[in-house]
Amino acid sequence: MGPILVLTDLHYTPDVPTEGPDPDARLAACLAHAAKAVPEAALLVLTGDLANKGDTASYARLKARLLDAHVPVRLMIGNHDHRENFATVFGADMLDDLGFVQGVQDMGDTRVIFLDTLFAPPYDYPASHCGWLCETRMNWLYRQLSDAPGRVVIFLHHPPHDVGFRAMDFLKLRNGAAFHDLIARHGNVAQIICGHIHRTISGTHRGTPFAVFKSPMMQMPLDFHTLNFEAECDDPPAFGIVLLTPEAVLVHSEDVPL
Ligand SMILES: [Fe+2]
Ligand SMILES: [Fe+2]
């Protein structure tokens, strides 16, 4: 089974922005680097915040760039996304029967689950910047965990617990404790992968390993105590690589030179 590439928090804009890096140029650089460094990749997961303002023009620009991807792409949404606009551009079949951007892919005996943690509609920011799994999505997750053929890897945009940044911890998955209760009852989740923070972070929470990756765009500076959740620094872009072996789930992060 080939590696899984993870690109998170693309924050696409409809055009080249007047200030700061261009998300389209950054994604192009990441895709070119990944194609050269990991040509055997089996899947590319984009873990949400695809568009900075959830508009159709940004999604259309992203869709055009993804024609360059050398692997199949799994699209996920985050708090900067707009579910209906996303489906307008990428197609209604991006929504499951329940109306969410979620899905499952069994890779060998590993079940990979992609969750939709968008706390909207209504798109009433800043509340909607938090993550949420409603009862419908929790029940769906329960079913996917229950009949998994082996270990499970879960991708979700919002970390389902604190990661140490005071500001961003306000914007985590609000019902992360219920999420962790659910996965603890099943006992088959080997790895959680998140975005949202724009920084490389790993550890365990209640015994389950998690990893968070940097973005192709701006990164979170190291200030655990700031209350400014828009703090950013222009460190190099990066992406994640997840290797599934019979004995292990191995998680790498690769900086991309500009
Ligand atoms: Fe983001
Ligand atoms: Fe986010």
Image (tube, rainbow, N blue to C red):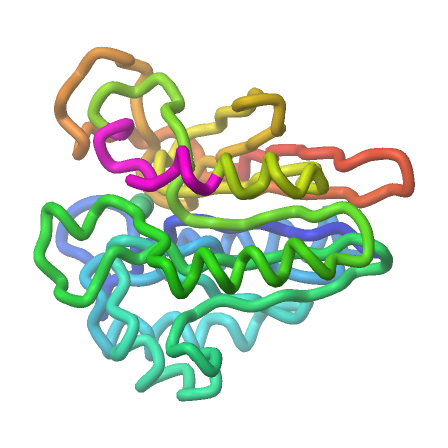
Residue in front for this viewpoint, 209 or 231: 209
- In the displayed structure, 1 sits above or below 251; it is below
- Judged left or right of residue 79, residue 27 is right
- In the displayed structure, 78 sits above or below 245; it is below
Total numbered labels: 0
Residue lying at 35% horizontally and 17% vertically, measured from the top left:
164
Please say whether residue 170 is one of the residues in the magenta stretch.
Answer: yes
Please say whether residue 103 is one of the residues in the magenta stretch.
Answer: no
Kindly indicate the quadrant of the structure image that contains residue 244: top right
The quadrant of the image that shows the N terminus is bottom right
Name the spot of residue 109 as percent of width and height, x first: 85, 55
Residue in front for this viewpoint, 157 or 241: 157
Query: Magenta segment range?
Result: 168-179
Residue in front for this viewpoint, 52 or 76: 76
Name the spot of residue 108 as percent of width and height, x first: 85, 59
- Judged left or right of residue 202, residue 217 is left
Kindly indicate the quadrant of the structure image that contains residue 240: top right
- Judged left or right of residue 128, residue 30 is right
- Judged left or right of residue 124, residue 54 is right
Please indicate, yes or no, whether residue 258 appears anywhere in the rendered image.
no
